[in-house]
Amino acid sequence: MKFSEFAALCYQLEQTSSRLTKVDLAAEYLKRLNAKEIRHGIAFLAGRPFPVSDSRTLDIGPGAFAHASDTPELENSVSPELTLVDIADSFSAIAEANGKGSRSTKYARLRELVEMTGSQERPILFRLLHNELRIGLHDGLIQEAIARASGADLKTVRRAALFLSDLAEVASIALTQGGAALQGVDIKLFVPLLPMLSELSEDFDDVLAAHGGTTAFEFKYDGARVQIHKDGNQVRIWSRRLTEVTGSLPEIAQIVRSDLIGDSFILDGEVVAVGKDGRPFPFQELMRRFRRIHNIEAAAIDIPLHLHLFDCLLLNGASLIDESYERRWQTLTNITGGKHLAHRQITSDEVLAESFLKDALAAGHEGLMAKSLSSPYMPGNRGKLWFKIKPAETVDCAIIAADRGSGRRRGWLSNYHLAVADGEGGFAPVGKTFKGLTDKQFTEMTARLQELQIADDGYTVSVKPEVVVEVAYNEIQHSPQYSSKFALRFARIKRIRDDKNVDQITTLTELQNLYDRQFVSKSKRTEL
Ligand code: AMP
């Protein structure tokens, strides 16, 4: 397929607000892709230069765009025959240029590519390079289009998407082997799947009631989620966002090889950085370990990691995700021989639960998780089967804009506009804060937000909502000032959540629940 046809589709999609029309148009486009084009075709449609499971990045700074957008349209170099595969090949060449002189190679490739596009296609190419197509086609609609184009039912497409974590893979199977082939897609070793998530609760009453009177409480460790896949001697580890982190965590891979029993399995757990006194290190230290690619051994001594496992999704080729939590835990106990397990207590007694929470907090952990004993493992699901209970009142917000600082904060973007998810793919502002960051973090955040800039009125810089921050607050107030109708009083940034995507932030509905709960004094636990 020609890139000009893709660009024309983008303009059509942009112009219609009808969901149905969007799905129709996208499905027609998918049907026309040949086998070699499907993966790129889906990535591009989702506004990405590469498919989700392809970890390559273009790695070109804003300078490159300025450079490339100067390119005059030279009639003789514009290629009306430019195809999707040509674009994908150029992206590969840009991504793969590294080492000495790579910057100029990247610029040269980018320039060649830009020169080949005509005036219709060029804006679409630029939006792709920026990872943002703005055609209103989120993953849900792409899933519908895959279903429509392949004749699979939507439920099957969704299930396959959870297991493969990449719509490019889903579409490849559906469109080359037929929609029915998706039914055979299952959890598979070395293909990470989205982790199961929890809903926030503050009240043991609610949690116990939702779980039928008895629940499994586990320590909620203040670390980072890991999904561990092992087959024989091969061990690979992924983060919550499905980035591979095996190289940064050699001692965890070693624990898996030497301490755990079983030929092949997939486990879910949390790693925590610990100090010499055995108490957890701050979260930022742990993130440093995750990003580390050099001097891993020195880091492993400086910041040792503990592993706390809490789930088992696959054992020796058999999927366990439809089994109950209790059965999965039993399997996990067999694999671990009781070592490296999350601390847990099954109870129906609120007083015991309170004291278990105190133990968790006293040991420096974040709170508790409560898991329904009969629950299956639902990848990517956030619901009442798992609750998290933490005493500090925090929400996760996206930064959607920032004001220029004055006085001591001059030169920085320092007053951050915070937003929760409005539940419809947009963002609802809930307040502003300049509290919580160190000077160094302000400097780094300023640079980061400048890269994400989408508008600037001289005082406030609007940014693409990508940075997620955990925000502590004292009270949620009703506020006519914000479209969300809520404002966080005394908001301060507790930490920068680089481990979270914007689609994982607090929703307006959750905020409403937290607001409502403020008035139920019986269940309000302020200090423990
Ligand atoms: P949050 O990050 O605030 O949404 O809380 C859920 C996170 O808690 C999970 O994604 C895990 O990274 C972490 N966590 C810590 N301990 C546990 C546990 N025992 N079970 C499940 N998740 C846990």
Image (cartoon, rainbow, N blue to C red):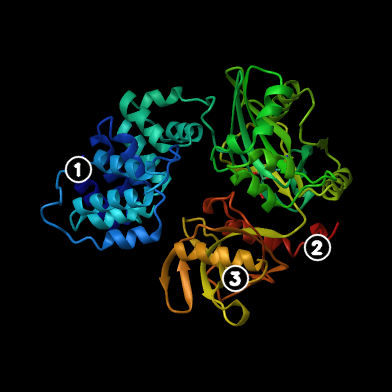
Q: Nearer the viewer, mark 3 or mark 1?
A: 1
310 relative to 73 in the view: left or right: right
Q: Nearer the viewer, mark 3 or mark 2?
A: 3
Residue wearing tag 2:
521
Q: Earlier in the sequence, mark 3 or mark 1?
A: 1
Query: For the point 20% across and 56% down, which residue is it?
Result: 120
Q: What whole-number distance in Å separates the C-alpha atoms at marks 3 and 2?
A: 25 Å
Q: Quadrant of the N terminus?
A: top left
Residue 210 visible, this angle: no
Which secondary structure lies at badge 2?
helix
Which secondary structure lies at badge 3?
strand
Q: What whole-number distance in Å separates the C-alpha atoms at marks 1 and 2?
A: 63 Å
Looking at the image, residue 51 lies above or below residue 399? above
The amino acid pointed to by label 1 is: Lys
Query: For the point 35% across and 56% down, which residue is it?
Result: 134
- Whether residues under marks 3 and 2 lie with C-beta atoms below 8 angstroms apart, the answer is no
Q: What whole-number distance in Å separates the C-alpha atoms at marks 3 and 1?
A: 45 Å
247 relative to 489 in the view: left or right: left
Residue wearing tag 3:
431
Query: For the point 70% across and 45% down, which residue is it?
Result: 223
Percent from the top left, x then y, of residue 249? 64, 36
Q: Residues within 10 Å of mark 2 (few under 14, many from 20)?
A: few
* Mark 3 close to ligand 1, CB under 8 Å: no
Residue wearing tag 1:
2
Q: Quadrant of the C terminus?
A: bottom right
